[in-house]
Amino acid sequence: MIALGIESTAHTFGVGIVEDKPPYIRADERVSYVPSKGGIHPKEAATFFLNNSLRVLNNALSEANLSIKDVDCIAVALGPGLGPCLRVGATLARALATYFNKPLVPVNHAVAHVEIGKLLTGLKDPLIVYLSGGNTMILAFSDGRYRVFGETLDIALGNFMDAFVRELGLAPPYIVDGKHKLDYCADEGSEFLELPYIVKGQDVSFSGLFTAAIKAFRSGKYRLQDICYSVREIAYSSIVEVSERGLIHTKKLELLVVGGVAASKALQEKFAVISRLRRVKLGIVPPNYAVDNGVMIAWTGLLTFKSGITIEPEKSYVRQRWRIDSVDIPWLS
Amino acid sequence: MVKLELLSSGAEAYLYKGEFLGYDVVIKHRVPKPYRDPRLDKLIRSERTLVEAKSMLLALSMGVKVPAILYVDLDSASIIMEYIDGILLRDWLPEIGEELRYRYLETLGNYVGRLHMNDLTHGDLTTSNVMVARDGELYIIDFGLARISEDIEDKAVDIHLMIRSLESTHYRLARKLLEPFLKGYEDIVGSDHLGKVLSKVKEIRLRGRYIEERRTRRDV
């Protein structure tokens, strides 16, 4: 069985093709919108997607050496994400499903990050730490769904890191050679500044840290590298702390880190330490699949389709705030 | 101090059972965490130890049951406190009948109301941080993330954490448990205050996160 998946929730437009047997991945094509200044502009990103969507689709099909007729279903990320971006993927998916008479399968973007992480790391029932531009969540499967055990009370970790280095004048671009500008800057720091470290229960919060760090930067009293080091140390440590709490609370024996921020080496080292300490198996999604991609949508679409879930094209609304714990996961039940 | 018996190794502290001045006690030691900078580690451990000891004394003065504090040492980030012979509410809830569940949650709401009326917030309010003693009395524990704060936001975070703990850990019972909790809370703080806190809870749950209720345009 073969699924084609379309991702267009934020800055990446991707088409992936997967099969339900090894080596699973038949095609992985993507393009990324990079803003020339500032953050992501949803309409600009959507226009960029539109102009590239057919080329990406055709490249994926030829990479897999398949025709669209060989595909068993069309999966699409209907959310969560940015409206204008989501609509590009949804429109293409509906058109393909309708014109070629293929079942359309709705996929939640967050569930897809988790499922591709599990496939590629071999973990079965992990506590999941999902860290990306728009998401900071501690998740675990329980009674039919991925339940949220902890999250950010204000901004997501990736968004925090981007906004911070932008404010410091270090970005865009935010990521160079797979490494975030905050990590580059922090690697050169050594002094530790006392900035707000906020953990509430199993939740984290970064807005207080952001404000205090910017204030420290503007005061001119500290080395930029030391500010970056302290900010990174505090932000990453608070995530690892709530992850450890989640492990104890859920009693899971595996720990999976997914999402774009999972690529950070400094963060990976902290997770390695805590996994040894707690004697749990650590899995970190490979960098290429930590970021948004069509393969994870295709793979999750395949699991969903095999569980008998499809959606009528006329009902396939995009859902900008489609929460992971509202999605039934029948393939695990 | 005589022999120590390890009771649990939680996320941030090891709990030992021992004897101190003739009492059965728990020694709570916040252990260093090798994943974070030692300077940050020291800061977090001594600050939380101090906050916990202070908050527990305050809670007692508000008529909320907590283990009595016997000794505090900030350098080693340790607290010696009264040993409560009991079970965590989290583990006890699934075992008991509806009536008893109702009573426990109502009492818990009552306790949290008293803390909040006195501007003390717990900061980690879950059913794992409440103990049911053998005599049936409830004790709130783990005040390391507590804060003295008049801010409605901090109080709302407590309620949000409680609701989420019910939703994620006791999802089958969540609704039935929340009602008595909020009733017990309201009995102390009044309906005005409850209304304010709940609308702040709603705001927190919608803020910048992916929540279905914050639906924008339903688009095709």
Image (cartoon, coloured by chain):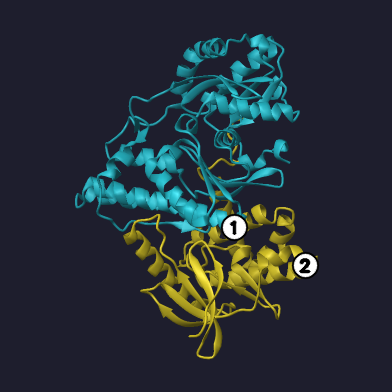
Chain colours: A cyan, B yellow
Residue A210 appears at what percent x and percent y? 36, 48
Residue A205 appears at what percent x and percent y? 45, 51
Label 2 sits on what residue type? Ile
Residue at mark 1: A249
2 vs 1, front mark: 1
A130 versus B34 height, above or below: above
Dividing the picture into quadrants, the one containing residue A101 is: top right
Spatial distance from mark 2 to mark 1, Cα to Cα?
21 Å
B197 versus A224 height, above or below: below
Question: Which chain contains the residue that carries disc 2?
Answer: B
In-front residue for pair B106/A156: A156
In-front residue for pair A106/B119: A106
Q: Is residue A186 visible in the rendered structure shown here?
A: yes
Residue at mark 2: B96
Q: Are marks 2 and 1 in contact (CB under 8 Å)?
A: no
Question: Which chain contains the residue that carries disc 1?
Answer: A
